[in-house]
Image (cartoon, grey):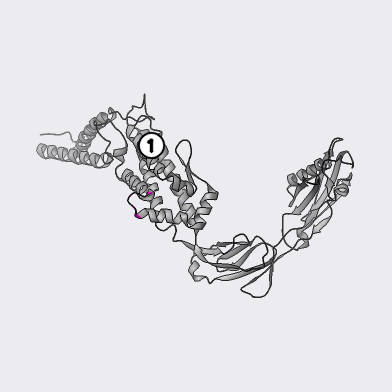
Amino acid sequence: MNINSNFGIGGLYNTLLQGNLAMQSNKLNRSLFPFPNNNGSGQGALGAGGVQYVNNIKSASKELGGAIRELSGSAFSQRTMTSSDTDIMSVKFSGNRPNSVSPMSVKIDQTAAGQLNEGARMTASASFQGSRGTNRFTIESGGKSTQLSVNVSATDSNKDVQQKMADAINKAGIGVKASVETDSATNASILRIESTTTGSDPKNGFSIKDFTGDLVARTGANDISRQGQDAIFSVNGGPIRTSQSNTVNLGNGVSATFNKASDQAVTISQGRDMDYAKSALQSMVNSYNDLYSEAVQRTGDPKAQNLASRMVSISKTYSGSLSDLGIGFDSSGRMTIDSKKLDAAADSGRLERFFTENSGKNFGFTNQISRLADNVSRNTSSFVSSSMFGSNLSENFSYSSLGSLMQFNHLRVGSLLDFMF
């Protein structure tokens, strides 16, 4: 048998193989999948949208399973350095081995603060008796002088003028902040102006004076009630230390932020890293919502709708316990977090007990969600409807079936070539 030498064995092989694969591809393209995001009323050929649909469900279920396993395993075993009283002092650890850091005690005698000017105590509702129209005043801060203006109308009260001055100062963004405090019982108001930079260094302070008008003189805005001051503290009963800032590096990767002074020392020691655990919980909530969203939005897919229903059923069973931890659900069925309740549950140990103790129970929330997520991840076809072959979509089709098809065609072409030669 003669074959045109220009055609070649490789050309014949490729032509036969591509032709057979093309016929199989055409058959696949004529198959319909009930994906709502595809053509028509939920029916369309499996294209990029359909493949993405399956991949999204598989990916979200893997993420959920992994997040649940971390919550029931390592999330609560992470360690860091903690403060015995976070109201007085909070602690941050940036090292790698908290167990190598010795406990320490810190006594805070004074916190760092910026300069504070407290104006005159004025009758809030009384008519302002100073200059009307445009008044200008200057603030010198950080080596820079800034001029501000306030327009005073004939109907402005003392509090109105104080608030206009505070607004002008805050809008300027010059390292000084202002507020108006009102005592409703006595109908009194005070303008407070404070440096945003703490410490006793004079360059951190500020001065304020009238340029035109008399707003500063009338309100007493230039009256200094506290100079800038340093934080004063000691560590492990040692010598007095000072700091211009309330955030202090204590060494070995430990930094502390002073919130207020105290007669009692605060202990820094090794403890559970609850921030890590709460981050793991947030990951679980995010992946739960991702999987639920993928399933519930496929209104034309009964299997996906069933998956969403199963997730809701499990969550409803434990809704009371979850709510106690700060985990709730919005009107659409997606998980939400109440940060205050979550913090309280974490501090009391209830959060850890729920996720670690439930992991060993056949019908606990952790166990049931984990098993469902793993099942979806391993057997995604059971949770996605398809009419391609009148049965479930096989996840392995695009890989194993296509590979078998190519191998089969290779044998057929090879046999044909053997016969021809």
Q: Position of 184 compared to 366: left or right?
A: right
Q: Position of residue 325 (x, y in %)?
A: 48, 50
Q: Position of 151 compared to 52: left or right?
A: right
Seen from this angle, which residue lies furthest front?
A: 185
How packed mark 1 is, by other alpha carbons closer than 10 Å (few <14, some 14-19, many 20 or more), is many
Seen from this angle, which residue lies furthest top?
A: 40
Visible in this render: residue 143?
Answer: no
Whether 28 is drawn above or below 270: the answer is above
Residue depicted at x 36% and y 48%: 370
Boundaries of the magenta span: 360-364
Q: Which residue is mark 1?
A: 295
Q: Secondary structure at mark 1?
A: helix
**Closest to the observer, 119 or 64:** 119
> What secondary structure characterizes most of the magenta part?
loop
Whether 26 is drawn above or below 413: the answer is above
Position of the C terminus, as image quadrant, is top left
**Closest to the observer, 330 or 30:** 330
**Closest to the observer, 120 or 188:** 188
Q: Position of residue 309 (x, y in %)?
A: 37, 37
Q: Position of 334 compared to 225: left or right?
A: left
Position of the N terminus, as image quadrant, is top left
